[in-house]
């Protein structure tokens, strides 16, 4: 099994980066990634130094998938996300949109939490279940090189808790080889990622990358054993939500044979929504698989 | 146990309505409500007639709670929501914000679904678990009389799936007696209530109304056995989310002794979000109770 | 000429208020109004006391227009807005959405400015041209009683600088008599009304109210000698803008004979936008009259 | 005077592009640019072919300014924008956010308009004054390579009518040489650029580029003879507006000696707002220069 170590830290999903690894479709590999803070915070005494590194969310990659061509999709199945140094770190800072109600005097603090036995030790008395996910996962666009701040049709900084072990993330291929990159692993994350800084950790992710030749998709999709989800990003969030639902309906239509307006009706009653970092507006609109194959009356 | 039948259908949360019932704090009662479509759709052949009734979401109420005064809160515990005619109805119409992706040719259709044995028969092959909730629940403001379309500090058309049996909804009291009203029961509802029309049903709701004297809250809150949730409404949704999180933090501070910026940190990692009708932008920000009483390091 | 003095201060556009004056269509009258601060700030030493009066923007009215019936429009032509005490007042307070960039330590101050010779003396060295407008102008809805905080199809707290002498504001009639109210005069206002408090003044407004029988409009419109404008309100502002443009296109279609998609093309190149209080999201989309009657190729 | 002809069409503001021209600060030059439609529409029979060219808004550049270093600003004064083929072209297509009100059956049409004697001949009977501007003007970021679709701190696709002859646009320098590019000239544009396609034309722009060493700015600014303006971009538009106002206040503070909260007060009464393409949410918040130097009471 191939292993891609942390190399140069890239902060863009860019076709200008040379592939660091070439794999065949269907290969399983392990990818190591630095934390979103570029490793600047390893103890509670450390501080985020934006002079030394102004960007966040360094990526490992890109990975070239043999045969991947524009118009295809990658299907990235995550098997495991392992903390590599037994801890994660977070920080508080400006409460941004919250300051209207809370003021702006949030102390800039850091906070390192050990991870042991599938628990995150957030304080002496509070533990959080270890439920890891990848904040950043994406391909390289052919138009523009997005930073690791936003999310978009290429994936990017989606910050969805469903980018996790057991799920398959589908991503459009825009350039030859696809150029997959990942990073920004969190030991756990709440909906909305309120402070914009999760429980950030260096990690090793075990994943399989399959290629779906000729399956053109308008943006990221997620398949779990029990659900399918369409993802859209951007503000205002009501617009992202509408877009995610529209993409989910079109998916139900094209792949599961649904009439689009019947799907629209059903989703009204059974859909679930997951919200990524609320400052970016990534949302996933979901439906349980058990509804998909119902014969329609 | 008192029983409030369907009476005049009110479409506003208004202090100008005479109370139809007076109860003591702590009383349990049953309230019958018409469906959101004002009962116009009982068969698949029926159509929503907006000439005959332009408004949606008729309320039953208002209920006067003895001793309730401005600055207090009502604590409304829902025990049961029972379908009174064994069926619910929905309709599809203009896809509004979705039409950018799907076009605007959605057929205007209606759809009546039987409810039996805790299942909603949505089609010949698809059943949806009966998981009822109240779309509308609120008190009467002292400034303005909101219609049953929006949601706000008084509650209103929140369309949250957490306004359901087993949970307690806290609402501010703005006028003497509180003037509680409710309606718009759904047999089930997805996050976002995509088409704006759920599985609407006439219902009987069994609830207990307690009075929390002197507990002044800025907007609706929901207590479940396992979680607490703060609610905010309005567009853009990222602003409602920020407001709901700010209110949840202030709640953790005032009632559970948390430092607000520690709460801000924790919520980043463990919060959940529930989204009501996305066209209105009601959201609930939640935290599990088990985190609330952790001694802080 | 009839004169309606300041009477009870109403803070809602409500059909529950008794008409204070009845006029015939086409009558010209003078309406006195208190300032948006309910007269609490007459000197720099005064402070806004929200205990004594929590609401803003008191209205004078309602005025019953003989013959006005649901489905008609009122056409309110403003001739003059005169300051009645030779001064206006403003205040600074929480910078709300700005605090993300500026912090939240804005001093709560008040500021009274003399008005003389068509100039507002804002400071020893800065004068602002006296360019008065009405922040609030509206009819009473038949569904709900909006406060004087929001704007909507009934008009309301639109805070547009085009609600000024020389212009005619069209408003839908929802209830018999129309029930017109007005207030919140500003001696001048910038686009966006940044701090939410303009140069507030008690005023006397001279206006003529005409009735357009059978002209049903979906929301406020403004006619100036050189332009027509459609108004929409609410967040997110990009949605209000889309709605205002759609309403302007429909107006060009119905009244000026335009093909809607030709209008859509032309507006792309020549429209202007005016922004009311940005926290509410009222916008006006405008086109110059000289374009309206061009024969189409 | 140097002349930069149309060369390779770039669709990104990218530090990966080789400079095509090097100039000294203070130089005046002429830059030719292709139209936003990549020249695909020269007659009414032409159609936009997105297969052949999926991107919009090709740029000419980048231009290296000697001595420009990260932390500096460029000051780009536009003297003239001349149509190079005596015509401009526009097209109508999906009405996107308008389709909620207007439906989605907009004919996909093109429309070529002659330009003569400072008039644009939009139809047989309608002429529009020739009031040219540049839709795209920007520097190359050091983090990410934005496409020519969005706008941001680097400038980009701002689509502001104030990017016009007589004005000076200030842009941050992020990489050595600044790497200035421009394109997307419009013969005229309305606020909001409703259909997203203006009166697009190939053009020759005469401009002077000055360098303001050490003047670090957070985003684009515009100086006209009578006004100064701060620019911000993104959705929701109320947030961009807040950001633009905050940046204008900070500008008044740092360069004109204003107390920030006094500036906040004044802007409430005298600011103007200009809206770029409403789908992107670029706005400019403005104040007249005559207010800036008033001694403060």
Image (cartoon, coloured by chain):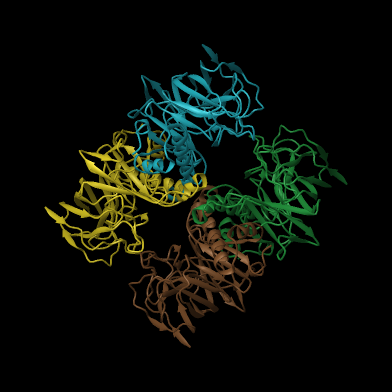
Chain colours: A brown, B green, C cyan, D yellow
The answer to whether one can see residue A211 in this image is yes
Q: Nearer the viewer, residue B159 or C230?
A: C230
Q: Viewed as shown, does residue B161 lie left or right of C125?
A: right
Q: Residue furthest right?
A: B1
Q: How many marks?
A: 0
Residue A85 x/y as whole percent: 51, 79
Q: Nearer the viewer, residue C91 or D15?
A: D15
Q: Is residue B73 above or below residue B119?
A: above
Q: Viewed as shown, does residue D263 lie left or right of B112?
A: left
Q: Viewed as shown, does residue D30 lie left or right of C175?
A: left
Image quadrant holding the C terminus of chain C, namely: top left
Q: Nearer the viewer, residue C75 or D206?
A: C75
Q: Nearer the viewer, residue C180 or A4?
A: C180
Q: Quadrant of residue D24?
A: bottom left
Residue B203 x/y as whole percent: 78, 49
The answer to whether one can see residue A84 in this image is no
Q: Is residue A6 above or below residue D90?
A: below
Q: Residue furthest left?
A: D1
Q: Residue furthest bottom?
A: A1
Residue D98 x/y as whole percent: 47, 46
């Amino acid at each position: 099994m191939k292993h891609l170590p942390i190399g140069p830290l890239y902060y863009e999903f860019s076709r200008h980066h040379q592939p660091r690894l070439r794999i065949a479709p269907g290969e399983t590999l392990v990818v190591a990634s630095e934390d979103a803070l570029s490793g600047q915070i390893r103890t509670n005494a450390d501080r985020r130094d934006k002079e030394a590194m102004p960007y966040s969310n360094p990526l490992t990659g890109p990975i070239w998938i043999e045969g991947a061509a524009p118009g295809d999709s990658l299907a990235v199945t995550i098997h495991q996300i392992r903390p590599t140094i037994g801890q994660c770190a977070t920080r508080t800072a400006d409460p941004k949109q919250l300051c209207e109600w809370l003021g702006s005097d949030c102390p800039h603090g850091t906070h390192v939490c050990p991870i042991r036995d599938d628990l995150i030790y957030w304080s002496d008395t509070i533990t959080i279940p270890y439920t890891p996910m990848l904040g950043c996962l994406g391909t390289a666009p052919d138009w523009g090189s997005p930073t690791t701040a936003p999310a978009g049709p290429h994936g990017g900084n989606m910050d969805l808790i469903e980018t996790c072990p057991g799920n398959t993330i589908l991503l459009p291929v825009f350039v030859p080889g696809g150029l997959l990159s990942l990073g920004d692993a969190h030991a756990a994350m709440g909906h909305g990622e309120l402070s914009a800084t999760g429980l950030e950790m260096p990690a090793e992710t075990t994943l399989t990358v399959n290629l779906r030749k000729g399956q053109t998709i308008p943006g990221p999709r997620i398949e779990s054993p029990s659900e399918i989800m369409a993802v859209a990003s951007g503000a205002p969030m009501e617009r992202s939500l509408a877009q995610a639902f529209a993409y989910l309906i079109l998916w139900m239509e094209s792949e599961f044979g649904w009439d689009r307006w019947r799907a629209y009706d059903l989703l009204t009653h059974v859909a679930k929504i997951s919200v990524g970092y609320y400052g970016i507006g990534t949302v996933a609109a979901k439906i349980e698989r058990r509804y998909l194959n119902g014969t329609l009356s």
